[in-house]
């Protein structure tokens, strides 16, 4: 899988999607939303200078204790946690941790706000049996929010498992391809709705 995602030998630290993202980032207002993954961390989206942003089909991932503003029932505790996580330091590792936490908190806020401004009416099959459809719906929403996110061109990675079959292909494969077809048809209609 690593080779398919990177076109490089095993152990590669960047993928071809991320390297495309490196090229796209120059035209984007923010490199944060250039390479976006909806299925966890993957070498495919890792670039030389672009980092992947992870999001779920339900939206941006928040640090709940900070987002809710009530860690242990106290707004002061939430505020102190945020300060602890984002305070700059002269220690190299602490400083990098603070930079990443700050980026995460700010990116979640921007993504949540941008996505709240997008309304797509195209129906998607959101049944639990088709995990690809909600991922592609989120991709369509992210494309709809591209201006607010400062992104002209983006790379997305979604996934649907279950294709590593060694028997019963005539039975299993059509059901998998039906999921792909249904999700892709809705995605295409949503892109038409967005005018892209």
Image (cartoon, rainbow, N blue to C red):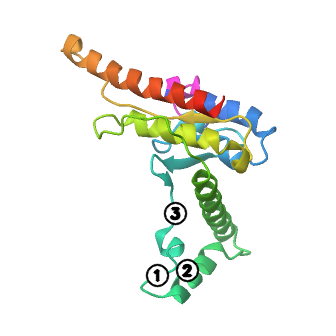
Residue identifier under label 2: 81
Secondary structure found at label 3: loop
Mark 1 in CB contact with mark 3 (< 8 angstroms): no
Secondary structure found at label 2: helix
Residue 10 % position (x, y) = 51, 29
Mark toward the start of the polypeptide (2 vs 3): 3
Residue nearest the observer in this picture, 20 or 10: 20
Q: Is residue 5 magenta?
A: yes
Residue identifier under label 3: 62
Mark 1 in CB contact with mark 2 (< 8 angstroms): yes
In the rendered image, the vertical position of residue 128 relative to residue 179, given as above or below? below
Dot 3 surroundings within 10 Å: few (below 14), some, or many (20 or more)? some
Residue 53 % position (x, y) = 59, 48
Left or right, residue 125 beside residue 63? left
Residue occupying the far front of the picture: 121
Q: Which residues are magenta?
A: 3-12
Residues under labels 2 and 3: Cα distance?
14 Å
Residue identifier under label 1: 71
Secondary structure found at label 1: loop
In the rendered image, the vertical position of residue 16 relative to residue 53, given as above or below? above
Residue 157 % position (x, y) = 53, 34
Q: Nearer the viewer, mark 2 or mark 3?
A: 3
User: Is residue 1 at all visible to an observer of this figure?
Assistant: no
């Amino acid at each position: 899988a690593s080779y398919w995602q990177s076109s490089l030998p095993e152990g590669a630290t960047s993928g071809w999607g991320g390297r495309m993202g490196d090229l796209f980032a120059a035209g984007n207002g923010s490199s944060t939303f250039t390479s976006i993954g909806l299925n966890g961390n993957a070498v495919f989206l890792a670039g030389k200078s672009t980092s992947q942003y992870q999001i779920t089909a339900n939206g941006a991932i928040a640090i709940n204790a900070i987002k809710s503003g009530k860690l242990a029932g106290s707004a002061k505790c939430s505020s102190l946690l945020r300060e602890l996580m984002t305070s700059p330091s002269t220690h190299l590792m602490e400083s990098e941790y603070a930079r990443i936490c700050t980026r995460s908190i700010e990116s979640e806020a921007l993504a949540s706000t941008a996505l709240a401004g997008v309304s797509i009416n195209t129906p998607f099959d959101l049944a639990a049996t088709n995990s690809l459809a909600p991922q592609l719906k989120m991709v369509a929403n992210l494309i709809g929010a591209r201006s607010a996110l400062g992104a002209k061109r983006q790379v997305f990675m979604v996934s649907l498992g279950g294709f590593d079959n060694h028997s019963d292909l005539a039975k299993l494969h059509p059901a998998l391809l039906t999921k792909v077809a249904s999700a892709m048809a809705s995605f295409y209609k949503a892109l038409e709705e967005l005018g892209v």
